[in-house]
Amino acid sequence: MILAAGRGERMRPLTDTCPKPLLEAGGKPLIVWHIERLAAAGIVDLVINHAHLGRMIEDALGDGARFGVRIRYSPEGSALETAGGIARALPLLGDAPFLVVNGDVFCDADFAGLRRAADELNPVRCAHLLLVPNPAHNPDGDFGLTPDGQVREDEGERLTFSGLGAYHPALFAGVSPDAPAKLAPLLRAAMARNRVTGARLFGRWVDVGTPERLHELDASLRAP
C-alpha cells in the first residue's frame, strides 16, 4: 500500500493544485519512483489511498498497467491518518501481511527484503519497520532499535521511522475504517508487548517534507 492521502500542508503552495505524491523530482512524480521500484522487486499488486485532489492521482496513474503493476484505489472523503487509511483499505489488502510505503518519501530501499520480512509476520509479531539515521529535522528520532532487532519505545539505538514497514492485518484490529487514527499509538502499544521488529534502511532516503527538500532532491537526481 502506498499512502497518498495527506494534504501536504508544509509543501504549500505547491500542494494547493497538485497532490504531494505527484510532485516531481528528477523528472517523475515521487509516487512513480516507488511504483517502479516495487515493480522491479516483483511487487505488482498495489493499493493507493487518496483524499486531497485524489482524482488527479487516479488520472495520472490509471490501473498501473503502463508500470507493469495492478493498482486499486482506496478513496477517503477526508484524510483518515495512517492507521485509519490502512484500516479503510484492509478489504483490498486481504488477510496476509503487506507492505506500506509513505508516498511522500524518496528512497532506494530493498523492497524485496522488506517483502521477505513481511512473510515472517503473524498476529503476534505483527510489524516490521525500516529505520534510518536521524535527519536534521528529527534529531531525537522516533524509536529505538535493539541489537536483536526489536523496536522499542525507549531502548536501543535511537533512529527515525522511514515511513516504510510491513504489517499483519491483526495490528489494525479494532481500528475504525471511517475515523482518523494515527499509526504511532498502535505501534507503541505493540512495542510494549514485544510485537515489533525492525532493521536499518541502508541506502538513500529523503523525507520530502518541504519545497526546499524537494528542490534539493530534484537537483541531485538531475545532476550528471
Image: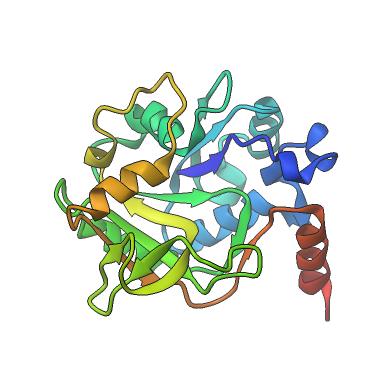
Colour mapping used in the image: rainbow
| Image location of residue 86, percent across then percent down | 41, 35
**84 left or right, relative to 19:** left
Q: Quadrant of the N terminus?
A: top left
**218 left or right, relative to 78:** right
The residue at 28%/57% (across/down) is: 118
| Image location of residue 203, percent across then percent down | 54, 77
| Image location of residue 159, percent across then percent down | 45, 69
Report the number of numbered marks: 0
The residue at 33%/59% (across/down) is: 153
Could you say which quadrant of the image residue 119 lies in? bottom left
| Image location of residue 165, percent across then percent down | 39, 55
Note whether 106 is above or below 21 in the view shown: below
**177 left or right, relative to 49:** left
Note whether 131 is above or below 64 in the view shown: below
Note whether 13 is above or below 80 in the view shown: below
**9 left or right, relative to 146:** right
The residue at 78%/38% (across/down) is: 15
Q: Quadrant of the C terminus?
A: bottom right
Specify whether residue 110 is in view.
Answer: no
Of 98 and 137, the residue lying toward us: 137
Specify whether residue 57 is in view.
Answer: yes
Of 86 and 135, the residue lying toward us: 135
